[in-house]
Image (spheres, rainbow, N blue to C red):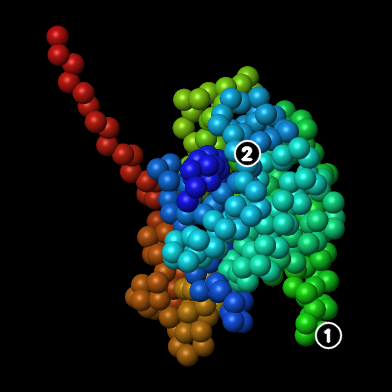
Amino acid sequence: MKDNVLRKLQVLADAAKYDVSCASSGVSKNNTGTIGNSSAAGICHTWSADGRCVSLLKILLTNYCVYDCEYCVNRLSNDVARASFTAEEVAELTIEFYRRNYIEGLFLSSAVEKNPNHTMEKIVKTLLILRHQYKFSGYIHVKAIPGADKLLVQQAGELADRMSVNIELPTEKGLQLLAPQKSMKKMFLPMKQIKDQITQSKEERMHFRHAKRFVPAGQSTQMIVGATNESDLSMLTITDQLYQNFSLKRVYFSAYVPVNRGGNLPALSTAPPMLREHRLYQADWLLRFYQFDAKELLDEREPNFDLDFDPKMIWALRHIHEFPKEINTVPYNELLRIPGLGMTSAKRIFKQRKVRAITYDDLKKIGVVLKRAKFFITCNGQFYGVKSMEPDSIKEILRPAQPFEQLQLQLP
């Protein structure tokens, strides 16, 4: 590898680690005589020291940026090492890494160099070289640059497996505070275009076998957690809207890692809010698979999650008047709302009770976490939790133990 390409790789792979929206799930594409296979393993991942997902070839096309977003390490006013790949260099790197079995695909993000169209043209050129010159069929995830021409977004979407537009902050107010050159309206435009063209592509393929596929693995986005004072309710509300309005495959949350000084930013010594990020991912799971909506999980009176308990437990404690539920008769959609029951255990209960009544001992074998579930169910009419059914009492029993603190001996 040439020295200048290696230097660029070091700079641009490091700069890409703050982007977490890189999962490769949701794509299935057969190898048709070309190299690479996106259905085999997707992108290979590794994990950085701060717990973030980092791909072996998760890179930026460039970190030269015309924007000056306060939270971003690549902001215009930062004095950091800069580099920019050519389309040919990225394509060659991808193929060389693939042939060495280092990767299964490419996650290509980018800062906005010169202007959105210039950057999007380079992304499209990279994909054209990979798909047509190298016949690469592996997984490719690229960014759609807000403000770029629609035709360029369309060309990229016909070559990539997944696209994403990172909205970064959940409200227009937050964007104006930290990234005044951006706006929600501009970011929603490519999202809508991608959604519409995915729908159109699916309809055309129902009638025409060789109709072009468009972003078959769907689109995703990312939001930063903790860079501003926005509540979990704000983040979850926009998440819910994104799923409903743009049919997003995933919304990723990224705990803010302080990299810049600024009056509107957390201090550099602030720890990334990893537990808050985890609670948001749990709530996101409830939105996508457990038939909850954002307003059920949080409200204006309590706009943030309790970090000691998962969101479903908190919802159940707030609605304690709806419990206990009889495990042998409760409908499936209500089974999903009982703490300690996942989708798998709920399906097993639903299937098993058609044969015979389920006993309390059966629940252990089915996989129910009885430590949590016993406060919210009856089994054949018998209740196994605390008799008072007081949320505070249940909280005290289930509250995680505080970690031991290492004492230090002070010598005179």
Residue to which mark 2 is pinned: 63
At label 2, counting other C-alpha atoms closer than 10 Å, the crowd grade (few under 14, some 14-19, many 20 or more) is: many
Q: Position of residue 243 (x, y in %)?
A: 71, 58
Work out whether 376 lies above or below 210: above
Is residue 299 rendered to the left or right of residue 192?
left
Name which residue lies at 75% across and 67% down.
158
Residue 73 in picture, x, y percent from top left:
58, 33
Q: Is residue 153 above or below residue 104?
A: above
Q: Residue furthest top?
A: 412
Q: Quadrant of the C terminus?
A: top left
Q: Position of residue 263 (x, y in %)?
A: 63, 19
The residue shown at (33%, 43%) is 401
Q: Nearer the viewer, mark 1 or mark 2?
A: 2
Instruction: Place residue 160 in its image quadrant.
Output: bottom right
Is residue 281 among what the camera can see? Answer: no
Q: Write down the residue under mark 1.
A: 207
- Above or below, 175 against 310 in this view is above
Looking at the picture, which amino acid does disc 1 mark? His
Q: Which picture quadrant has residue 35?
A: bottom right
Residue at 44% x, 64% y: name it: 100
Of mark 1 and mark 2, the one earlier in the sequence is 2
Amino acid at dot 2: Asn
- Percent of width and height locating residue 299: 67, 44
| Residue at the image position 43 percent from the left and 50 percent from the top | 47
Question: Could you tell whether 275 is left or right of 398 in the image?
Answer: right
Q: Secondary structure at mark 2?
A: loop
Quadrant location of residue 405? top left
Residue 124 in sight: yes
The relative height of residue 7 versus residue 25 in the rendered view (above or below) is above
Image check: 183 left or right of 57? right
